[in-house]
Image (cartoon, rainbow, N blue to C red):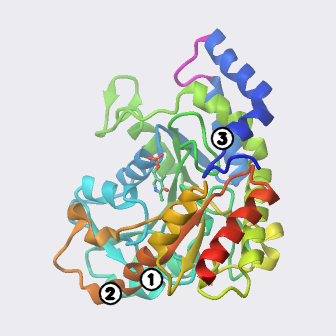
Amino acid sequence: MKKIQMVDLKGQYKNIKERVDSSIMNVIETTAFVNGPEVHEFQKELEEYLNVKHVIPCANGTDALQIAMMGLDLKPGDEVITADFTFAATVEVIALLQLTPVLVDVDPVNFNIDVAAIKKAITPKTKAIVPVHLFGLTANMDAIMAIAEEHNLYVIEDNAQAIGADYLSKDGVKKKAGTIGHVASTSFFPSKNLGCYGDGGAIFTNNDALAHTIRGIVNHGMYERYHHDVVGVNSRLDSIQAAVLRAKLPHLDSYNLARIKAAGKYTAAFKGIENIIAPGGFDANKNEEEKTHVFHQYTLKIINTDRDALVKHLNANGIPCGVYYPIPLHLQKAYKDERYKEADFAVTNQLVKEVISLPMHTELDDEQIDFITQTIINFVAK
Ligand SMILES: *Cc1c(COP(=O)(O)O)cnc(C)c1O
């Protein structure tokens, strides 16, 4: 059996080596290292793929979130609601901009921000909601957009984990994750569903004026050379990364399908096994066609069992795994707030004890999946 890896970037590279190598060499030959044609072409290709009017590439997914928020009409002290159960980048940039993060609980089945909790957290100071499409599944955007409209709030989608996922609205309209809110951010960190060979990120929006504002912000607040109209940042996608992304974008759907198929095999193996709860909140039978969950992570809930002992057991058997995320954000030193009440975070507080993410990438084979699932089942059953 091939060695099991959490993410197998090398196996993926082997299949696209020629194109990647020649594109990188081309950037070196032309020396257009920053803002070269590769970046521009990638931007256009991603706009087309996502069916969104504007993609603004930048240096990483954390910058993308920060810049998206800088582009909106937000002031220090404005409250921004986001999920307690996510990667810290989401809340970090809110705090960094001197906005007030308001963390809320998530849904126990799909792990995404809880709509009732959003409603409960709204105050006259609330100005924005940041849903995170966690582990590859789009949050409940119909409900979130309805709340936003009612209370006149911005919606900033953190789409670092769900690029390529489709979202089916109640009215039957299908859109790509990250093209539904007012603005969205994504990350091209190597292990993300569309990853480059270093750092990268992008902002998406359908709003022309906002796109214009953001294009200036990423470039030192310049709209005309050496005229700095707003305080900006320096955040660029470099041309070599864009070249890698251009080589990979045509494969994104097949990469996501490979993840969906691996996830389907995991879920089938765990069916009916007590104490193992497979990822839910989407129609697993239709997911190969509909791609509503693109499985950035395949995350189980392990109940009535010592999850940490399972992690050790898997590692001892050569199976890497992850606990995303082990500590709720509201309990992190940097993000504590006396207004929080523990009872309001019952789901996240429980999830951090139960979740385990299994190896998930485009190169997993049946032998590996059988070994992983059998090892888990034997452990949980004993
Ligand atoms: C990865 C990630 C980010 C940050 O992306 P970087 O490119 O690492 O800065 C932000 N939010 C979520 C949910 C992520 O998973």
Residue type, label 2: Asp
Return the disc, 1 or 2, that comes first in the chain's sequence: 1
Spatial distance from mark 1 to mark 2, Cα to Cα?
23 Å
Looking at the image, which residue is at 66% across and 29% down?
243
Crowd around label 1: few <14 · some 14–19 · many ≥20 (10 Å): few
Crowd around label 3: few <14 · some 14–19 · many ≥20 (10 Å): some
Give percent across and percent down for residue 185.
Answer: 50, 53
Spatial distance from mark 1 to mark 3, Cα to Cα?
44 Å
Crowd around label 2: few <14 · some 14–19 · many ≥20 (10 Å): some
* Closer to the eye: label 1 or 3: 3
Residues at circles 1 and 3 in contact by the CB criterion of under 8 Å = no
Residue on which disc 3 sits: 9
Spatial distance from mark 3 to mark 2, Cα to Cα?
39 Å
Looking at the image, which residue is at 77% across and 76% down?
268
Q: Is residue 52 above or below residue 347?
A: above
Residue on which disc 1 sits: 150
Q: Is residue 205 above or below residue 60?
A: below
Q: Residue furthest left?
A: 338
| Residue 5 tag number | none
The answer to whether 20 appears left or right of 55 in the picture is right
Assign a secondary structure to mark 3: helix
Q: Which residues are magenta?
A: 30-36
| Residue 344 tag number | 2
The answer to whether residue 317 is visible is yes
Residue type, label 1: Glu
The answer to whether residue 79 is visible is no
